Image (tube, rainbow, N blue to C red):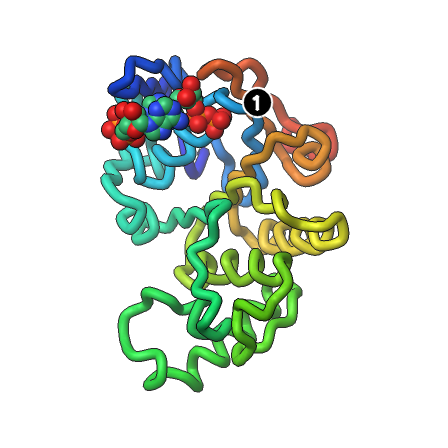
Amino acid sequence: PPILDVRDVHKVYRTGTHALRGVSMRVRPGTVHGLIGANGAGKSTLIKILSGAQTVSDGEIAWRGEPAHWSSPSQALADGLAAVYQHMPLVPSLSVLDNVFLGHTGSVRWDRTRRTRELAELCDRVGYPLDGDDLVGDLSIGARQMVAILQALARGPALVLLDEPTAALSPSEREILFASVRRLRDTGTTFIYVSHFLDEVLDLTDHLTVLRDGLVVLDAPTASTDEAA
Ligand code: ADP
Ligand code: ADP
């Protein structure tokens, strides 16, 4: 069964814009599910809805077989769906360690040893080395993007929604990020990967949903996988 089942979702903004006009999408666990479309297609609207930042006008979303009634991103996060937005909520003047565990309850200082160990484990899982003491403001864009992803992973989500994660990355940083996503997928994490570059989505994803003018115009497994088998 799908981990996330979007059924006939509509969104009409107060301005009258009908941004989603009956979108359905099934995300299978342990896959990277691509979501693409030109500007204005409705990608941001859909991912805001999925991450609890917006409500639907009509339609249903089921999460692990149960109706999802998220009215904030923190509720979605508590249920196991974490979003990493293009504008990363990182604090440049804080260390990698403090950023990764930003917003966790309990004192950071108090738990430093345990968190240092957890960070090392997270770095192992993504296959990307980071020094917890480095200031985020001193890191490359690629390393910052990884800190944002680790910040999401530190909450133990079942599904991570990545919004245009390679927008500011160099080609080599992009390949490193792809390798991390594949690694995490192969150990069971599910991803929704939002992009407006078809080629990069084809490289990475197991399944692709294409939005245009608020409608799904293509929904198919990508050639590189055995999903259809
Ligand atoms: P709603 O509460 O209707 O779901 P939001 O709270 O997200 O809508 O947005 C409130 C207002 O912000 C909209 O009614 C609109 O005037 C404005 N707005 C924000 N982003 C956009 C956009 N991309 N295009 C048009 N209007 C926008
Ligand atoms: P994309 O992310 O694919 O560029 P969006 O979801 O941002 O698409 O936009 C879909 C449509 O909804 C566009 O016509 C956009 O102007 C409109 N829109 C987005 N956000 C708002 C908002 N808060 N209020 C009103 N209209 C919006």
* Residue at x 44%, y 86% (from the top left corner): 113
Mark 1 sits near ligand 2, with its Cβ under 8 Å away: yes
Residue 122, compared with residue 166, is above or below; it is below
Tell which of 213 and 156 is nearer to you.
213
Location of residue 9 by image quarter = top left
Tell which of 200 and 205 is nearer to you.
200
Residue 202, compared with residue 156, is above or below; it is above
Horizontal and vertical percent position of residue 50:
37, 36
Left or right: residue 44 compared with residue 170: left
Whether residue 6 is visible, yes or no, is: no
Tag count = 1
Horizontal and vertical percent position of residue 143:
61, 62
Left or right: residue 176 compared with residue 110: right
Tell which of 184 and 66 is nearer to you.
184
Q: What residue did someone put label 1 on?
A: 38
Residue type at mark 1: give it: Ala
* Residue at x 54%, y 72% (from the top left corner): 121
